[in-house]
Amino acid sequence: MMLQVQAVGKSFGGFKAVNEANLTVEKGELVAVIGPNGAGKTTLFNLITGQLKPDAGRVIFKGEDIAGLPPHQICKKGIARSFQIVNVFSRLTVFENVQVAVLSQQRRSTNLFSPARNLAVNETNNILKSVGLLDKAEATSGSLSHGDQKILEMAMALGSEPKLLILDEPTAGMSPEETLATMELIKRLASTQGLTILFCEHDIELVFSVAQRIMVMHQGRTLIQGKPDEVRSNKEVQDAYLGGGECC
Amino acid sequence: MFKGVISLKSLWWQMAILAVLLILPFTIPTFYVYVLSLIFTTALLAMSLNLVLGYGGLFQFHHGVFYGVGAYTVALMLTKTSLPTWIGFVAGPIVAAVLGLVMGLLCVRLTRIYYGMLQLSLGSLVWAIVFRWYDFTGGDDGIHGIPLPSALSSLNGSYYFALIITAICLIVMYLIVKSPFGGTLQAIRDNPVRCAAVGVNVRRHRLIALVIATFFAGVGGVLFVTVERSVFPDLLFWALSLEVLIMCLLGGWFTFMGPVLGAAIVVLLRTFVGIYTEYWTLILGATLLLLVMFLPQGVMGYFQEKFKRGSKATAGRT
């Protein structure tokens, strides 16, 4: 068991954004979290990766409770993430964006006197190559298209050499073609690099075709986690989410 | 160490400028030599601020405190103790950096404007102590006639000292900016949340940057003592810090040499317009107004943009 989220909860004021959320991710799996807008998917990811501290419950990663640790420590333990809203270092080049992550992973980011441009070059270029951004390496990241910035998000997460990669709506705002290409990329990363991936996504059909297991959230609560077939045939899920006609 | 950091072409340029500055004192009136020394000193101060402001994204509103503390440390050690001069020169930056560390520990928990407010108030506290503690610091009189070794007591001596120390500090700062630490610092400036998510300890990086920046501000303070041979509480007053902030914005806070240019412009304005009117700040204000409207990236930023245009698109200010 790689990741176990047990009865995690988080309230903002009186509003329970996440309440009794449960999730398990096995090594090598591709797991999706789905749920309507406001179901608490992003909040759940923020609780796992430390941007938010849970009020209740435990987050167990490789046998260790990591709930409440600061983000940089959680990253060092092997969980990296991308963000739903594009969140890159806009004044730095594409190369530098990924290099920051690689240098941090190599614990060289407090190195004061060796020129950065000669460090971690191969590692960074390999990552850029694997996601198809190598030809844009020297472009300022703020000048990239939205789709490319989302891919860069993912490349930065890969720079941390994660055991578990968490992607928060990796295809948000992408065109249908870009979405398909990105999904292919995610599948390829999972198979070729043996990555364990947890992601959330709006496009239900896409999720059912890609994910090995799916967790459904509704109003901050976990309805079910299971194989696509189990989820599809679950009565509760149909009522809450799929059943209400074509929701998206 | 320099491989891949400095291009040969720009190296020639820098060598040429340095050579001109080295022979300049023999050809110009002494007053200009003094003004140039002041520019070097101020430029070093502005550069040190920009390390945390432009590269670190920290609103260090009251950076002058560390300049003043560095200067006062030297002044006090040279007047009140019989220790060798060089110990005072080394102690200045170190005391400034220690103060930077202490203040930083309190401030880095906050971000953006809140950081600036706390830093400003803590800095003003230091100013108040220096201003009021007559027995020790001389209060608003300051300390004058600081004894210096004979090599530094001539105008040319202090000029060369300021020039060489400033040049060395600029090189070291350049290396830092281009190092993994410098790159990470810029990433933190652009997006601290994302940086934490790739495993960077944001607070620790900011704290290290602060200690480095305040150290160099302290070096600036030492240079000030060698140039002026006196210290006064105005060195720690917020008005000077604001002026230094303006230098960075004026020159271009996202460029390396921008603050040097900004410092030169402000010192020249103060010196030469200040001769005719004590309202020289009016000119500074008008310059700043024009700057904000027409050159939001600063003077250096504007030229960099111009040279780059056509080759590739650059990210806008966000």
Image: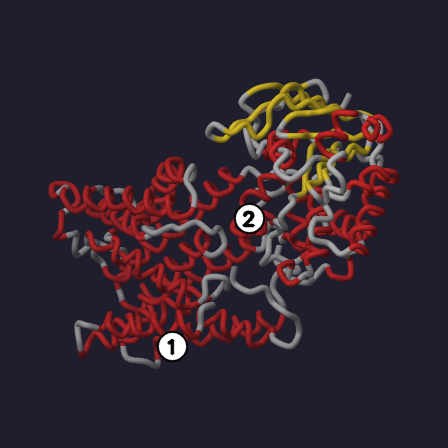
Above/below status of B257 relative to A204? below
Find numbered disc 1 in the image and state the secondary structure of the residue it sits on.
helix
Of badges 2 and 1, the one in the foreground is 2
Residue underneath mark 2? B191
Residue shown at 78% from the left, 21% from the top = A1
Q: State the residue in front, B229 or B6.
A: B6
Residue B274 x/y as whole percent: 21, 74
Find numbered disc 2 in the image and state the secondary structure of the residue it sits on.
loop
Q: State the residue in front, B43 or A71.
A: A71
Q: Chain of mark 2?
A: B
Residue B130 x/y as whole percent: 19, 45
Q: Estimate how packed mark 1 is, as few (under 14), some (14 to 19) or many (20 or more) residues with alpha carbons within 10 Å.
A: some
First in residue order: circle 2 vs circle 1: 1
Residue shown at 42% from the left, 66% from the top = B260
Amino acid type of the residue that numbered disc 2 sits on in the rendered structure? Asn
Residue underneath mark 1? B24
Q: CA distance from mark 2 to mark 1?
A: 44 Å
Assess whether mark 1 and mark 2 are in contact (beta carbons under 8 angstroms): no
Spot the residue most to the bottom.
B27
Residue shown at 82% from the left, 49% from the top = A130
Amino acid type of the residue that numbered disc 1 sits on in the rendered structure? Leu
Q: Quadrant of residue B53?
A: bottom left
Query: Residue A157, can we see it?
Result: yes
